[in-house]
Image (tube, grey):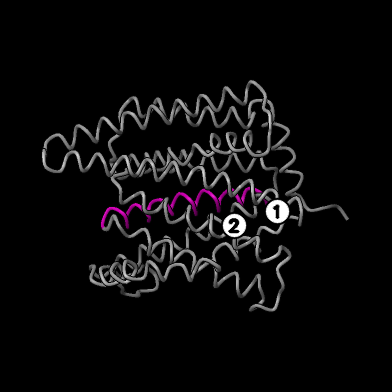
Amino acid sequence: MHPAVAVGLVFGGCCSNVVFLELLARRFPGCGNIVTFSQFLFIAVEGFIFEANFGRKRPAIPIRNYFIMVAMFFTVSVVNNYALNLNIAMPLHMIFRSGSLIASMALGIIILKKRYSVSKYSSIALVSLGIFTCTFMSAKQVASDSSSSQEDGPQAFLWWLLGIAALTFALLMSARMGIFQETLYKKFGKHSKEALFYNHALPLPGFLLLAPNIYQHAVLFSQSELFQVPVIGLTLPIMWFYLLMNVITQYVCIRGVFILTTECTSLTVTLVVTLRKFVSLIFSILYFQNPFTGWHWLGTAFVFVGTLMYTELWNSLGPLLARCRSRGRPKEQ
């Protein structure tokens, strides 16, 4: 597949996924569990059919390693989605998760004993400054908004602090999972589609612990106003339509990233994902009219400029694009 098609899948799938997630979260802020469960179930069923061949294909990586990876992956997914229920705005949620470079570098130094160039450390410092700026200004907004209610103000701010702690934990856990996955790939070879299937199939029994919350939101979704789906004319509650579109776009997003990793280098993938996050952020602010000050814009600029510095885009963009174009062309006979 041509790299441009994969880029289109990433931007189209991931950006539209953020839109439907916010439509769900704005109506029912605590719906993260049913969203996560639906995404896991859909990808697990698809992987069971097309990757595991209905359970007949043996995994290339020992299953015990997947259980460890799954515990991390399940925790990260649930915590990230649940953070939306802890007074965390969607723009801050996306910006904070853009700081994965910080966590990856920190754990790489501690666990893998890696060392980086001065430019790498500078870029991480810039990303850290951007996240701190946005977090600090959001804290001031929460404190200002909650000051009008003396009864609920301190409680709202404490919930916000808990949300920041949850995002920090998820960021570090995600980086640790990446290091663990990198170690497995070096030992057993790259099996991204297999890992995608097991990371979504094995955690499914864990959702039994969240069954009451999932059932509660399923009932609430069913009580939402009816919506007629364009073209096919199917009528269903609008919240179920949003959830269905969120699940489909999440799958398109993940598949696009996977295809891109097979067509281009990891540097190009990082660039595409970074730009996708920026487009999602801008769209969320403009379309949903989320509060965003000049300081937030400055912090956002720090985050994304620092990320691009980390990828050394300025020195490598030309050769990378040429390499991707050459990989996308059919071989001469």
Which residue lies at the image location 43% right of the left edge and 61% below the top edge?
36
**Cα separation between marks 2 and 1:** 10 Å
What crowding class fits label 1: few (fewer than 14 Cα within 10 Å), some (14-19), or many (20 or more)? some
Q: Are marks 2 and 1 in contact (CB under 8 Å)?
A: yes
Which residue lies at the image location 52% right of the left edge and 24% below the top edge?
125
In front here: 287 or 307?
307
Number of marks in the image?
2
Q: Is residue 315 above or below residue 108?
A: above
Q: Is residue 282 above or below residue 31?
A: above
Task: Tell me the magenta residue range.
Answer: 1-27
Q: Secondary structure at mark 1?
A: helix
Residue found farthest to the right: 333
Task: Tell me the residue that label 2 is attached to.
Answer: 69
Percent x, y for residue 190?
A: 73, 55
Q: Name the kind of residue labelled 1 in the image.
A: Leu
Residue 161, by quadrant, is top left
What crowding class fits label 2: few (fewer than 14 Cα within 10 Å), some (14-19), or many (20 or more)? many
Percent x, y for residue 290?
A: 29, 40
* Quarter placement of the N terminus: bottom right
Percent x, y for residue 91?
A: 37, 40
In front here: 142 or 18?
142
